[in-house]
């Protein structure tokens, strides 16, 4: 199965979704009927011959890498329409972000029973991530503020924490993580860094 990195796009218009209930040629070289790939996901992971990578195609897909004369890319509904219009033969692949092992996802309630000074052997659920960010601000109001800089179509937030906000101006640095959906460890490490800076402020 193929899973979206950002499931639940509520902005897809019904007309757009219906337009992809098609008879297409290209999935593993076979004829596929009623291939509505984007009903439950925002994008699929595909491969196609590298000699067919034109400028128009490169703007329509998000190229992951090119190897052995094959392009590996993520494609959403609009890019998929460009592939079909160009008669690009493609193969659906397993996304690099898809895993076949237990991710050890933890809810916010479960995180509250853990010693976050040492124990970071988990991935927080999205709800746990958001709650943890707000909890930092509640626990350390004199040291940090939470900012929502964007809200995705899935209604999930892109959040920042600014630390040491009430002190005199000092040299500043901004850390970001998980710019791509299959780079999942970065945001956990960022949460751990925030926790360490706040809990050890003035001590370490």
Image (tube, helix red, strand yellow):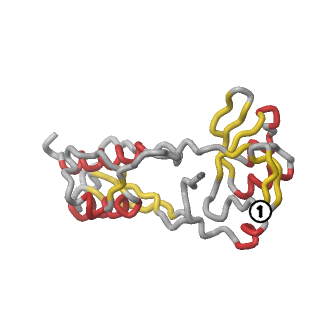
Residue positioned 19% across, 51% down in the render: 115
53 lies left or right of 92: right
Quadrant assignment, res 23? bottom right
Residue positioned 59% across, 65% down in the render: 9
From this view, report whether residue 68 is shown above or below residue 17: above
Instruction: Compare residues 97 and 148 and report the one nearer the observer.
Output: 97
For label 1, the SS is loop
Spot occupied by residue 29 in the image (x, y as percentages of width and height): 79, 43
From this view, report whether residue 67 is shown above or below residue 106: above
Instruction: Compare residues 149 and 82 and report the one nearer the observer.
Output: 82
From this view, report whether residue 96 is shown above or below residue 23: above
Check disc 1 and report the residue beneath it. 34
89 lies left or right of 168: right
Tally of numbered tags? 1
From this view, report whether residue 42 is shown above or below residue 71: below
Instruction: Compare residues 69 and 159 and report the one nearer the observer.
Output: 69
Spot occupied by residue 96 in the image (x, y as percentages of width and height): 55, 42
The local crowd at label 1, few if under 14, some if 14 to 19, many if 20 or more residues have their Cα within 10 Å, is few
Q: Residue furthest left?
A: 203
167 lies left or right of 89: left
Residue positioned 54% across, 63% down in the render: 152
Spot occupied by residue 12 in the image (x, y as percentages of width and height): 66, 68
Residue positioned 48% across, 45% down in the render: 100
Spot occupied by residue 190 in the image (x, y as percentages of width and height): 35, 46
Q: Residue furthest top?
A: 68
Instruction: Point out the image quarter for the C terminus.
Output: top left
Q: Residue furthest bottom?
A: 14
């Amino acid at each position: 199965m193929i899973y979206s990195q950002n499931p639940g796009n509520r902005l897809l218009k019904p007309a757009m979704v219906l337009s992809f209930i098609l008879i297409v040629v290209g999935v593993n070289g076979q004829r596929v009927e009623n291939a509505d790939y984007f009903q439950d996901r925002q994008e699929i992971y595909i491969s196609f011959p590298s000699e067919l990578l034109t400028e128009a195609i490169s703007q329509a897909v998000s190229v992951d890498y090119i190897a052995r004369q094959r392009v590996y890319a993520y494609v959403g509904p609009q890019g998929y329409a460009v592939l079909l219009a160009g008669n690009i033969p493609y193969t659906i692949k397993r996304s690099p972000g898809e895993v076949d092992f237990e991710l050890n996802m933890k809810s916010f309630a479960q995180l509250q029973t853990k010693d976050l000074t040492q124990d970071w052997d988990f991935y927080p659920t999205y709800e746990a991530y958001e709650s943890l960010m707000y909890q930092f601000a509640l626990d350390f109001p004199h040291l940090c503020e939470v900012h929502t800089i964007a809200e995705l179509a899935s209604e999930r937030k892109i959040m920042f924490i600014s630390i040491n906000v009430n002190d005199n101006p000092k040299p500043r640095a901004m850390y970001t993580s998980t710019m791509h959906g299959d780079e999942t460890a970065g945001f956990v490490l960022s949460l751990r860094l925030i926790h360490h800076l706040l809990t050890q402020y003035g001590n370490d």
